[in-house]
Image (spheres, rainbow, N blue to C red):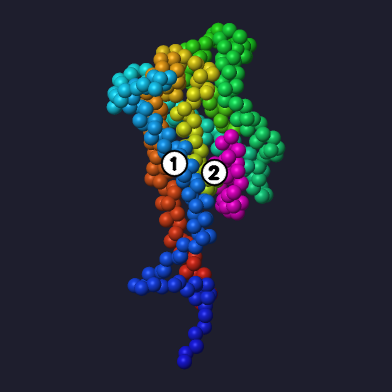
Amino acid sequence: MKDTIPTAKTASRRPEPAARGGRPRRRKLTFDRVTFFLAFLGVPLAIFVIFVLIPFGQAIFWAMTDWRGFSPDYNFVGFDNFTKMFQDDVFLKALRNVALLAVFVPLVTLTLALGVAVAITLGGPSKGPVRGIRGASFYRIVSFFPYVVPAIIVGLIWAQMYDPNAGLLNGVLTGLGLDRFETFAWLGEKATAMPSLMFVIVWGLVGFYAVLFIAAIKGVPAELYEAARIDGAGRLRTTVSITLPAIRDSVQTAYIYLGIAALDAFVYVQAMLPNGGPDNSTLTISQRLFNVAFAKQQFGYATAMGVVLAVVTLVFAALVFLVNRLTGGGEGESKRKAPGSKARRAAAEGGAG
């Protein structure tokens, strides 16, 4: 009888129970497995169905009625509310406004947040171990502070700072010799109302995402940065080639959250521009929905706007995932890394043999 010498490969391999036809047998449903799935899958799924899917289905139903909101009587009108909505010039303008916010607010906020995070974590001395700048904790606290303040207070504070007669901004600019800003209405001019609103939203959110990126960069192995430094890569090259690919998933998640916040932006707009700004230049869908529901008592029509806003949000998130996948992120990136890992395993097995 020929002796066989076990190798690392055969020793680590678990015997798989085989059924008829060579297929592995299915595991039996034991009490532990059933309770595990009920606790960690059944309960969250039930909560999701009760508090997300069912209310959304109810919203679709009420969007097809002429419900007034404070009466049990209503008539089913089908898709008339949606037809009316897309013939409403005010709603279409609000849709264009939220599209602008969804494009520019995440882009500017994440760019600034990433710059702050890289400067704090990797902006230290160019010699020796890779480390952040001196006093990094202080800068993290300072950058995070605006996010701690509630959004409604941020909006009210900046509304006072933008005041054309007694605002701090005009006072500073006038003190610097720019007399044309003495009574300039930042929120009253169509050309400056939307940029002023975007600035406040970015100012209020950039600190949180800077801290988020700092935590993500801390998880990147220091050996990668040290190897890049030995190869002569500068800070910009290191950021583009190492930092961004390593925290790609964090950037994607942050972009989705910021896009959802920008598509809503109700608190900031309502605090600074409750009437939608000059010529509705800053009106958002949520603000239009609020006015239609509570000022005109057209809750069916307002619910239809809410359904459209939810669909636009889902489409935005899907586009972010699609762009990330097409540009090499997600599963595509892991598939490109798979051959290399297989080669390393083969080499290790060969060396063991």
Determine the main secondary structure of the stretch shown in magenta. Answer: helix
348, above or below 144, in the image: below
Using the rendered image of the protein, determine whether residue 97 is visible from the camera's viewpoint.
no
Residue 240 x/y as whole percent? 51, 43
**Which residue was labeled with disc 1?**
49
Check the image and report above or below for 29 versus 95: below
Q: Does the magenta stretch include residue 227?
A: yes
Residue under the image location 57 percent in, 12 percent down: 163
Is 223 situated left or right of 346 in this image?
Answer: right
Q: What stretch is highlighted in magenta?
A: 208-236
Q: Does the magenta stretch include residue 212?
A: yes
From this viewpoint, which residue is outermost toward the bottom?
1
The disc placed on residue 287 is none
Residue 76 position (above or below residue 110) = above
State which quadrant residue 234 falls in. Answer: top right
First along the sequence among labels 1 and 2: 1
| Rendered residue at 44%/49% (across/down) | 330
Does residue 146 appear left or right of residue 106 in this picture? Answer: right
Distance from the alpha carbon under mark 1 to that under mark 2: 42 Å
Work out whether residue 223 or residue 103 is closer to the camera in this orientation and state it. Answer: 103
Q: Residue 198 appears at what percent x and percent y?
A: 50, 24
Residue sitting nearer the eye, 62 or 226: 62
Q: Name the residue under label 2.
A: 239
* Residue type marked 2: Thr
Q: Can residue 18 be seen in this view?
A: yes
Q: Residue placed at 53% from the left, 75% from the top? A: 11
